[in-house]
Image (cartoon, rainbow, N blue to C red):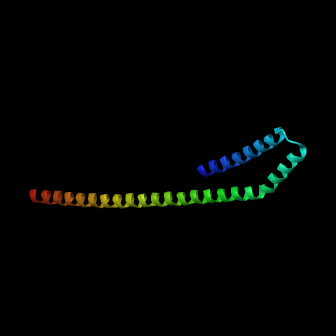
Amino acid sequence: MSQKRSLVFIGGLMIGAAIGGVTGLLTAPRTGKETRKIVQKSADAIPELAEDISTSVQIQTHRLSAQTVRNWNQTINRLRDAIAVGIYVTQQQRQTLTKENSININTTVDHH
């Protein structure tokens, strides 16, 4: 879920930056020639910007994946510990019940 939020945030950031850039260019007090030069420089920078954003998304995805694996491993370890404790307690209860039953049987036999 948080990975989706990160990707949505990055996508929104890109769209917001693009809208802000276009709005700034269109409302700036420059001549058409100057504006075209700025637009051309911006267009030339888009592939590099897209690559940077792609790299950032990949790094973030890797971090989230690694964290998910760590969380999963911790959960599995806690589950194993809980199962081991459950088995131990069950065995102790069986031994206690077996001893109690043995004592009850011996007491019953002695009284007769």
The residue lying at 13 percent from left, 57 percent from top is 107
The residue lying at 66 percent from left, 51 percent from top is 7
Horizontally, residue 44 falls left or right of residue 5, namely right
Residue 19 occupies which quadrant of the picture? Answer: top right
Give the vertical position of 27 relative to 103 (above or below): above
Of 12 and 51, the residue lying toward us: 51
Give the vertical position of 79 relative to 31 (above or below): below
The residue lying at 19 percent from left, 61 percent from top is 102
Is residue 1 in view?
A: no
Name of the residue lying farthest toward the left = 111
Residue 94's x, y, as percent? 27, 59
Is residue 43 in view?
A: yes
Of 9 and 31, the residue lying toward us: 31
How many discs appear? 0
Horizontally, residue 108 falls left or right of residue 11, namely left
Of 64 and 105, the residue lying toward us: 64
Residue 44's x, y, as percent? 81, 56
Residue 65's x, y, as percent? 57, 59
Of 62 and 23, the residue lying toward us: 23
Residue 31's x, y, as percent? 88, 42
The residue lying at 23 percent from left, 58 percent from top is 96
